[in-house]
Image: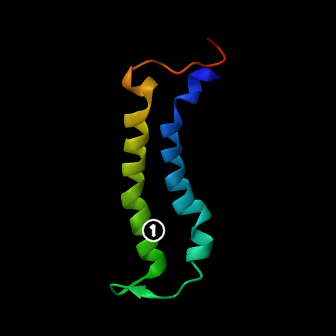
Amino acid sequence: MSRYRHRRTLLWLLVPYLLFVVAIPFVNRIDPVVLGLPFLFVWVLIGVLVSPAAIWLASRGDPLFAANEPEATDVD
């Protein structure tokens, strides 16, 4: 378990989940227009642009990814 304690940068992977799954029901209730586009469309566009950056930050800070080590499984 202590092996996973230093992998806190994997919390960046929650960002796409929060943007697409948790926030969409709340954002869908807002009706303003941003740059001529509905707010929900702008929100999804921002999510699509931010998600790769969050995944990159998660992989960049992960010590096992940087060491190129395989992750431990129950089979090992």
Seen in the picture, residue 37 relative to 45 is either above or below; the reply is below
Give the image quarter of residue 75: top right
24 sits left or right of 49 in the view:
right
Q: Is residue 11 above or below residue 7?
A: below
Residue in front for this viewpoint, 15 or 41? 15
Q: Position of residue 65 (x, y in %)?
A: 41, 27
In the rendered image, which residue does mark 1 sit on?
44
Q: Residues within 10 Å of mark 1 (few under 14, many from 20)?
A: some
Colour logic: rainbow
Relative to residue 68, is residue 33 depicted above or below? below
Judge by depth and name the residue closer to the eye, 7 or 51.
7
Q: How many marks?
A: 1
Q: Is residue 19 above or below residue 69?
A: below
Q: Is residue 61 left or right of residue 21?
A: left
User: Where residue 59 appears, x then y in whole percent?
Assistant: 41, 36
Q: Nearer the viewer, residue 6 or 40?
A: 6
Identity of the residue drawn at 61% across and 74% down: 26
Q: Residue at x 54, y 50 (%)?
A: 14
- What amino acid type is highlighted by mark number 1? Val
**Residue lying at 52% horizontally and 88% vertically, measured from the top left:** 31
Q: Quadrant of the N terminus?
A: top right
Q: Position of residue 55 (x, y in %)?
A: 42, 45
Q: Residue furthest left?
A: 35
